[in-house]
Amino acid sequence: MASTKATASRGGGKRKAAAAPIKVSVEDLQSYYRDMLLIRRFEEKAGQMYGMGLIGGFCHLYIGQEAVVVGVQAAMGPLDTVLTSYRDHAHMLACGMDPKGVMAELTGRSGGYSKGKGGSMHMFSREERFFGGHGIVGAQVPLGTGFAFAHRYLEEDAVSITYLGDGALNQGQVYESFNMAALWSLPAVYVIENNKYGMGTSIERSSAKSTELYNRGQAYGIPGLQVDGMDVLAVREAAEKALGHARSGKGPFIMEMLTYRYRGHSMSDPAKYRSKEEVQKVRQERDPIERLRGIMIERKVMDEDRLKALDKEVKAIVSEAADFAQTSPEPDPSELYTDVYV
Amino acid sequence: MPIEVLMPALSPTMTEGKLAKWLKQEGDEVSSGDILAEIETDKATMEVEAVDEGVLGKIMVAEGTEEVPVNQVIAVLLEDGEDASAITVSAAPPPAPAAAPEAPAAEAPPAAAPVAAAPPMATPAAAEPEWTGATVTQTVREALRDAMAEEMRTDSRVFLMGEEVAEYQGAYKVSQGLLDEFGARRVVDTPITEHGFAGLGVGAAMYGLRPIVEFMTFNFAMQAIDQILNSAAKTHYMSGGQISSPMVFRGPNGAAARVAAQHSQCYASWYAHVPGLKVVSPYSAADAKGLLKSAIRDDNPVIFLENEILYGQSFDVPDSPDWTVPIGKARIARPGKDVTITAFSIMVGKALEAAETLAAEGIDAEVIDLRSLRPLDTETIIASVQKTNRLVNCEEGWGYAGIGSEVASVVMEQAFDWLDAPVKRVYGADVPMPYAANLEALALPQAHDIVAGAKEVCYRS
């Protein structure tokens, strides 16, 4: 069984290593690996298609951060809801949304989740309980808090999970939300995906106490955990704790995921604000997929043949999505004026 | 000299109130700061404190008296050595509030008073023409409360949130009694955090609840406009029709009285600009109730623009919880044949007043209460212009890119050949709202401006 290397801190207390071994099944390990791989291959394909002019506008890739969504998803209950910002493709895939529908939205086709009207940053699925995909930095945080409010109002066994980046964390509305969530003990979990850069500005240049973002709820009494966001098992373990806290009526919880994006902020970002060496170092030493692969081989959970077969399977899914996204027709011109009002 | 104690104004818009209770009796000694009496208005209860020392010589207004005008003498204090025979003041209120400059928040002199002097109550709007059942006389404030209460009774998903809506009973007492009936789960006091609670409301609506988000005034909604536009208005389209935001953003809009620029702005054209929003702005209590019920039932985000000065005005309201006013339908408030005047919210009262003045001069004006600004009932406007061939449109807000500009464009596009004169716009001065009473009155469009506009398009001097 694998063990987590998460460093954990709680509500402003001292950091301490939580190194107790966690139980995980072979099936779970394989499933996390597959899910992370699917996200990476999907995003690589999206990057390619963007380069070919098939995807327009903004396109924010998640490559490098895969362990975060996959680990959190693994800890979620069936009624829990998810909201995030615009770096959202991975969240949708992790929630179980169809890669074809996601990719077709990227290409602006009628087969996309928003019928081609939303694009990369704006997709939703009521069935999979994924509620966007929101384009304004930080705006998803009050919205997600509203979902928590609704879960409580309707007396559901559900937690609202809201993802936000380290950059969004400096928006005022985030703290307005923290205040209300704590004041009313709402079942909300906030997942800060700290990939170290808000577009081109490093966390050190934008945020006071940048090494302690998990503490940003301290003034409201919201407990926080700092987690190795490159380790899917550590993420899962922390998420179980956070979700359990919120689900039991104790109010909101904040998790800071230390992670890294390998690509630029968006496709048009040359990423001159950091060195190639910095990116290479993370890829070599902390890559979440390689890390899990290593564990599985070491523990003989999977052999190279099985891994190769899995790679092939994932590639096929992505390839099918890419084909669909190019053959699905553009929205009918009559769609211009639909869906403005209910 | 005996000292007169005057009926105080609790707010810039208060004109009268009830003397609920005397806490001091005739002959009692009074020190500065002592509470003399309690007074009530339809939105608040306040204590009257003594400013001077002396003996309460005579109570001029008995407790329980209603509709006591602001600045009426309610009691007389005697100084040392004086006796009640020194009292010679009459109980009649001073002719103009300006005669009592020390009275707190006195109304502006009638000549310049933008609102207090106008008698919109003198022309109460009739109920919807199709309504033939019983009516009750209600203030706009009561009608809004009843609309919310009725909808909350029939739909458990409807809840009210905002600053001071619950325990305080509403900053303007619109939500009076709702906490008692529905409890804190459904009548939610928020912190002062407009951006946050507006966004929270949108999230709750996206999930399936039907929030009524109250802004203490729409001036403060500017803190939240990103959530209103980018989250509530656009998400239905951006989700390909999957996610809707069935909710109401409501609160007072436009100028109140003497609260200056940051608290006196009309946002009608701001919100009416945005596809995905519906925008309504009623004048009468009947429309306030009927439209608010429709707004709560609507599956889209609705901006519901109220007016503080109208809250206390009374109108006939159909006496039925089933009665609603459709969004998108204007109302002909006064039929006429010579000139069309369009208005919304408080300007409807001024337009009706102007129409009476014009009638005396032989001009028969048709007044249209737009009620809905998005969608706009262009059909009713066009039909009226085709009849009168002349249009004056009025709004309290700025003219630049205003509702009147839109109305003028629509008429030019759809009824150009029917016009016998260029469209005339009447609107607020293109300045931040000044505080000084005389400047404020100049900044706000008045009935006489509408009269002048109507004469201009009728080529009459």
Image (cartoon, rainbow, N blue to C red):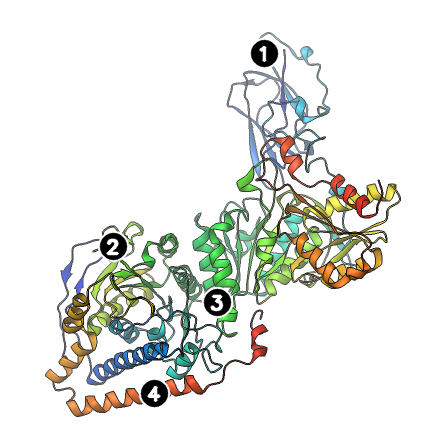
Which of disc 1 and disc 3 is earlier in sequence?
A: 1
Quarter occupied by residue B303 = bottom right
Spot occupied by residue B228 in the image (x, y as percentages of width and height): 50, 58
Identify the subunit bearing mark 2.
Answer: A
| Nearer the observer, B435 or B191 | B435
Tell me the residue at 34%/58% (across/down): A168
The dot on residue B265 is: none
Spot occupied by residue B314 in the image (x, y as percentages of width and height): 71, 46
Q: Which kind of residue does numbered mark 4 sit on?
A: Ser
The dot on residue B206 is: 3
Spot occupied by residue A184 in the image (x, y as percentages of width and height): 39, 56
Residue of label 4: A319
Q: Nearer the viewer, mark 3 or mark 4?
A: 4
Q: Which kind of residue does numbered mark 1 sit on?
A: Glu
C-alpha gap between disc 3 and disc 1: 65 Å
Task: Indicate the secondary structure of the residue bearing disc 2.
Answer: helix
Identify the subunit bearing mark 1.
Answer: B
Task: Indicate the secondary structure of the residue bearing disc 3.
Answer: helix
| Nearer the observer, A195 or A95 | A195
How many numbered discs sit on the rendered protein?
Answer: 4
Identify the subunit bearing mark 4.
Answer: A
